[in-house]
Image (tube, coloured by chain):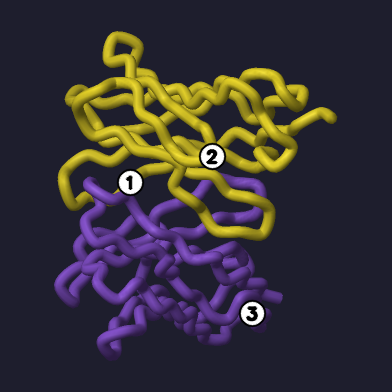
Amino acid sequence: AQSVTQPDIHITVSEGASLELRCNYSYGATPYLFWYVQSPGQGLQLLLKYFSGDTLVQGIKGFEAEFKRSQSSFNLRKPSVHWSDAAEYFCAVGLDRDDKIIFGKGTRLHILP
Amino acid sequence: EPEVTQTPSHQVTQMGQEVILRCVPISNHLYFYWYRQILGQKVEFLVSFYNNEISEKSEIFDDQFSVERPDGSNFTLKIRSTKLEDSAMYFCASSEHPVTYGYTFGSGTRLTVV
């Protein structure tokens, strides 16, 4: 069965520093990949998604992610974080066209002033 | 921007009672989902619903759970006899086409079973 792993439970970065959140998936074929963000007390908001084509995808709020098939990874990046980026970030994977998506356990991002 | 609306935002119920969580998906969406998130844990898939029937359900979605789309706008999750371990945040999501657009999630209902 497909799975998605986020190896970092917590990440702390200083405001203005760059960010990379790791995500690895397990599946033989090319999956559909997503990053969601959950601010405290809020629902999940889609940051970006990858289905095919260009392996570097741009999302909202200045985030981007790169799909690397050889590493089964889909890491999320941002060149300069803002205090408002403090939240929980979930990587998710889907398979068939109408299938459910499976979430990783999430990475909680803390921002130092 | 269209939203998925969930009510209530917080519900407290006694163990053994029935609860109904309500969701109003985005109007032109065809795919509907329920997920739950126990405090501090990951978001878990419960059930997907398409064309007026369940398309997939997880092991969590046992006989105590049911979903309905009673009219053209609402999508409900019913838990017949709540247990303490049902305490969680329940998220509804909908999509016009999951792979193309991803899901839009509601803000969730926090269910507390006492």
- Looking at the figure, which quarter contains the N terminus of chain B? bottom left
- Amino acid type of the residue tagged 2 in the rendering: Lys
**Chain that bears disc 2:** A
- Locate residue B72: give its quadrant: bottom left
- Locate residue B4: give its quadrant: bottom left
Q: Residue B76 location in percent, x, y? A: 39, 80
Distance from Cα at disc 2 to Cα at disc 3: 32 Å
- Amino acid type of the residue tagged 1 in the rendering: Ile
Q: Are marks 1 and 3 in contact (CB under 8 Å)?
A: no
Q: Which residue is mark 3?
A: B11
**Which residue does the image show at 63% across and 30% down from the upper left?**
A9
Distance from Cα at disc 2 to Cα at disc 1: 22 Å
Q: Which chain is yellow?
A: A
- Locate residue A59: give its quadrant: top left
Q: Which residue is mark 2?
A: A61
- Looking at the figure, which quarter contains the C terminus of chain B? bottom right
**Chain that bears disc 3:** B
Viewer-side residue, B48 vs B30: B30
Q: Is residue B103 above or below residue B22?
A: above
Q: Is residue B36 left or right of residue B61?
A: right
- What is the drawing colour of chain B? purple
Q: Residue B45 location in percent, x, y? A: 39, 54
Q: Are marks 2 and 1 on the same chain?
A: yes
Under circle 3, the secondary element is strand
Q: Residue A94 location in percent, x, y? A: 28, 41
Distance from Cα at disc 1 to Cα at disc 3: 26 Å
Q: Nearer the viewer, mark 2 or mark 1?
A: 2
Q: Is residue B105 above or below residue A58?
A: below
